[in-house]
Amino acid sequence: MHDVKFIEANLEEVKKNLSMRKFDLSIIDAIVALNTKRKVLTTKVETTQSEIKSISKEVGFKKRSGENADDLMSKVGKLKESMTDDCSQLDVCRDELDSLLSEVPNLMEDDTPLGTDEAENVEISKCGTPVELNFPPKDHVDLGEKLGMLDFEAAAKMTGARFVVYRGQLARLERALANFMLDHQLDRGYEEIIPPFIVHERALYGTGQLPKFKEDLFKIEGEDWYLIPTSEVPLTNLKREEIINTKDLPIKYTGLTPCFRAEAGSHGRDTRGLIRMHQFNKVEMVNIVHPDDSSQALEDMKRSAEEILEKLKLPYRTVRLCSGDVGFGARKTYDLEVWVPSQKTYREISSCSNCGEFQARRANIRFKSEGEKPKFVHTLNGSGLAVGRCFVAVLENYQNEDGSITVPKVIIPYMNGVSRIEAK
């Protein structure tokens, strides 16, 4: 959410920045016009209130003096009727203004690469060499099904497409990867949180998923509740409507949760396997920081995610998202993409974003030092990592010709010493 005063004071800069996103700039013009109308109506209401107060005093004086005050009382009645109409118009104006402001995405940093979509993201670094197998690589679906430990058919019978049942050692591998990731984040000063997996719509508004991404959410019928699309939502909203003491910053949360996404508009994309599911597990990082520290916090968050891939010895690359691919609530984003042998390409496994004060304004999260006025914090979020996609990368990069899977060394302790997953 943006401060309308900031938009008015920096109109051309705001329009220039939003044009990089191909945003409809007529909405900005409508916001300015509505705010002008709001100010006129506000002044009119305040003037009428002042006039009513003044005349009411005169009415009281006349009555105490025994004089007739009917004409003045009639005037007060007409003024109140007029003010009621103006107040109604003002409420409508404010609602329309808030609605339009909620549609405006975050402003991107000035050095954001220009581009239309993910194909124009800019590679920042690359780590590891894509594995060269001396046999044709199988994809994770074939590997999992031949092991008898990934069951898409059973999931489809009970739920539908884009769900899966993990079995046996592969179920344990998924859990082991998640626990490894959580421990990694805890070692870096994060506090572990197990939040609700259902949130009120106001929480989703606070982090920017509503109203824009309503179609991608699973709503609970008859309630103002939704299943979480990412634990970024509850973790960020832990500080909703709070004023944090400056000395308590930064706040760093991590959590492992399922994520639920309707994947609206993704028909035909990644329909095979675990890349794009309606339900998947993810370890999330959320930072709530002083504005002066958010740029470094983003670099630290990115590095934490990179270290997980390096410990797993999975080849990956880091990219800076271009203007056409930066998310609605982000001002700067890095994606980490892991090598997937069967697809012979890198696929996103983590996205780390600095949202500036965009979410903090929507969720009213502020900080202050003694004697100072409250200011909005900066919020950041990042995947540390998407567990299912990491599972995919491990299966495919660590596969053997006989279809067995070598367990990465750092994961063996989480597997109770199991170093190889084979069909029984």
Image (spheres, rainbow, N blue to C red):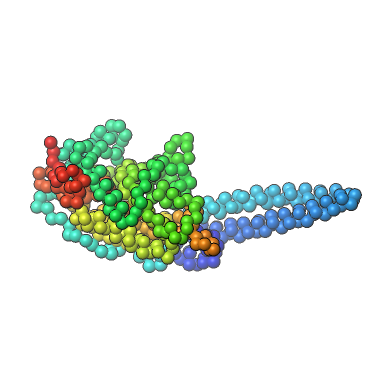
Task: Specify whether 415 is left or right of 230.
Answer: left
The residue positioned farthest toward the top in the image shown? 157
Camera-nearest residue between 197 and 151: 197
Task: Determine the image quadrant of residue 48.
Answer: bottom right
Q: Residue at x 23, y 40 (%)?
A: 171
The image position of residue 63, as x and y in percent, is 86, 49
Task: Specify whether 325 is left or right of 240.
Answer: left
Task: Specify whether 229 is left or right of 173.
Answer: right
Q: Residue at x 23, y 55 (%)?
A: 309
Camera-nearest residue between 139 and 234: 234
Q: Residue at x 66, y 56 (%)?
A: 41
Residue 272 shows in this picture: no
Total marks shown come to 0
The image position of residue 277, as x and y in percent, is 30, 43
The image position of residue 302, as x and y in percent, is 31, 59
Camera-nearest residue between 71 and 356: 356
The image position of residue 286, as x and y in percent, is 37, 54
Q: Residue at x 89, y 52 (%)?
A: 65
Residue 254 shows in this picture: yes
The residue positioned farthest toward the right in the image shown? 66
Q: Quadrant of the C terminus?
A: top left
